[in-house]
């Protein structure tokens, strides 16, 4: 393979180490995604893994290889949440203390879960990269062992056990697609899967707002970018890992990016059709299938890499996803300030079958005798939304979308 520091034998050994720690997560067939691609599509449900994501695999393998003296010194890590939980759980299983640096604003459920596994949580900066720097400083200052979220052979080998399971569970798999942040997951899965079946295509998916791999692969080496804010915080990594990059450079066939709307649409689909709760970073593979189905040669397996989502964020993302799918419409309508005007508008909405979720009646800033009504509507899809808008405009209403 591209780098002798991580081998297929390392992945096999990692699976033995994880036998009583990590779950062999199920693969579920998706009828709706199969229709999109034109062939079988399955979901590898790492959102159902212990600690809620695949991260326990790599974290535990790394920690289990520590010496007794290293375990006494404790471990330190940095994470937006999933690696934090993996490190906290893994260190607890071997009896080592853990400190985790997390970005300010990390999802509260992830923070609470990390603490519940026994780790100390310290907030640092607003990105994973800042938290990583602080964690390294902590390691140098205290002697704690730094557990990198993706740039270590043990971590890559642990994540690679997913690739072994996929090939065993679906031997005819043609394409494996998964989220791509620092690269540990994609590197490990590619190494394992292509060692067993060299013809398997591997596709990595990044959020458009934080896509360091396309520019890095074009340059031939890791390039640092400044990640913008993205709902997919778990893959918002500014610079690829050195070791994952080498493996991905040789073994990953394609890297694509997805928009925020793509991600939210995919999250809604997983909830509605697959009955799976998945976080934005974990649903990137499904988002890519919906946005670019021509890229994927079936049978396809999309890795749902994590399910740790803040309920408040879930509510926002669901609304965003419904809007992206044409099922949620926000509009503003100027009205004459006279009795019955608002009632007439709402009656028309009812006749058109649009469900009014929220309404705001505003006089400030309008001409005397006018008001503005802001409506949030639930519709049956894009065609119904267009019907509603077209009819209202034909009735003489001046509609402003958004």
Image: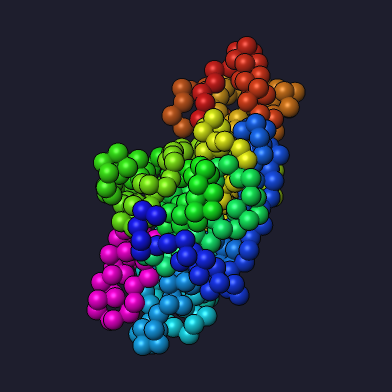
Q: Nearer the viewer, residue 173 or 280?
A: 173
Boundaries of the magenta span: 123-151
In the image shown, does 297 or 280 lie closer to the viewer? 297
Side of 220 where 264 appears, left or right: right
Q: Position of residue 91 (x, y in %)?
A: 47, 78
Q: Is residue 351 above or below residue 189?
A: above
Left or right, 250 with respect to 295, comes to left
Picture coordinates of residue 301, whole percent (x, y)? 59, 46
Q: Where on the picture, by quarter, is residue 163?
A: bottom right
Asked if the magenta segment contains residue 384, the reply would be: no
Q: Is residue 182 above or below residue 336?
A: below
Residue at the spot x=29%, y=75% of the render? 139
Q: Is residue 27 visible?
A: yes
Q: Residue at x 71, y 39 (%)?
A: 31
Judging depth in this view, the residue of 266 and 206 nearest the camera is 206
Quarter of image, res 319? top right
Can residue 343 be seen in this snapshot? no
At x 65%, y 22%, the residue is 383
How many circles with numbers are drawn on the protein?
Answer: 0
**Left or right: 211 with respect to 25?**
left
Q: Residue at x 39, y 84 (%)?
A: 67
């Amino acid at each position: 393979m591209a780098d002798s520091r991580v081998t297929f034998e390392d992945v096999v050994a990692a699976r033995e180490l994880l036998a009583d720690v990590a779950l062999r997560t199920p693969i579920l067939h998706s009828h709706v995604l199969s229709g999109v691609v034109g062939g079988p599509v399955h979901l590898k449900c790492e959102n159902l893994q212990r600690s809620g994501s695949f991260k326990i695999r790599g974290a535990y393998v790394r920690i289990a290889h520590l010496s007794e003296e290293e375990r006494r010194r404790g471990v330190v890590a940095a994470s937006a949440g999933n690696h934090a939980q993996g490190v906290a759980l893994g260190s607890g299983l071997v009896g080592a203390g853990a400190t985790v640096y997390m970005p300010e604003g990390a999802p509260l459920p992830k923070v609470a879960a990390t603490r519940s596994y026994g780790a100390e949580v310290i907030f640092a900066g607003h990105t994973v990269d800042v938290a990583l720097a602080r964690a390294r400083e902590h390691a140098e200052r205290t002697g704690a062992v730094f557990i990198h979220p993706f740039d270590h052979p043990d971590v890559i080998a642990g994540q690679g056990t997913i690739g072994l399971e996929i090939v065993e569970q679906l031997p005819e798999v043609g394409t494996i697609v998964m989220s791509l942040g620092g690269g540990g997951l994609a590197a490990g899965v590619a190494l394992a899967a292509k060692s067993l079946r060299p013809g398997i295509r591997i596709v990595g998916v990044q959020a458009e707002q934080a896509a360091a791999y396309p520019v890095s692969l074009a340059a031939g080496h890791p390039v640092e970018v400044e990640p913008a804010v993205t709902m997919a915080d778990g893959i918002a990594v500014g610079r690829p890992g050195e070791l994952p990059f080498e493996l991905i450079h040789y073994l990953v066939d394609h890297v694509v990016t997805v928009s925020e709307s793509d991600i939210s649409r995919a999250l809604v689909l997983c909830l509605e059709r697959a009955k799976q709760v998945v976080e934005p970073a974990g649903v990137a593979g499904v988002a890519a299938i919906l946005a670019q189905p021509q890229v994927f040669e079936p049978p396809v397996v999309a890795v749902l890499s994590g399910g740790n989502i803040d309920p408040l964020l879930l509510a926002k993302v669901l609304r965003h996803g419904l809007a992206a799918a044409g099922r949620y419409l926000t509009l503003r309508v100027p009205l004459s300030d006279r009795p019955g005007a608002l009632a007439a508008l709402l009656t028309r909405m009812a006749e058109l079958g649009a469900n009014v979720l929220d309404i705001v009646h505003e006089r400030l800033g309008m001409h005397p005798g006018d008001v503005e009504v802001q409506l949030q509507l639930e519709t049956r899809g894009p065609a119904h939304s267009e019907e509603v808008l077209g009819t209202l405009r034909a009735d003489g209403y001046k509609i402003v979308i958004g």
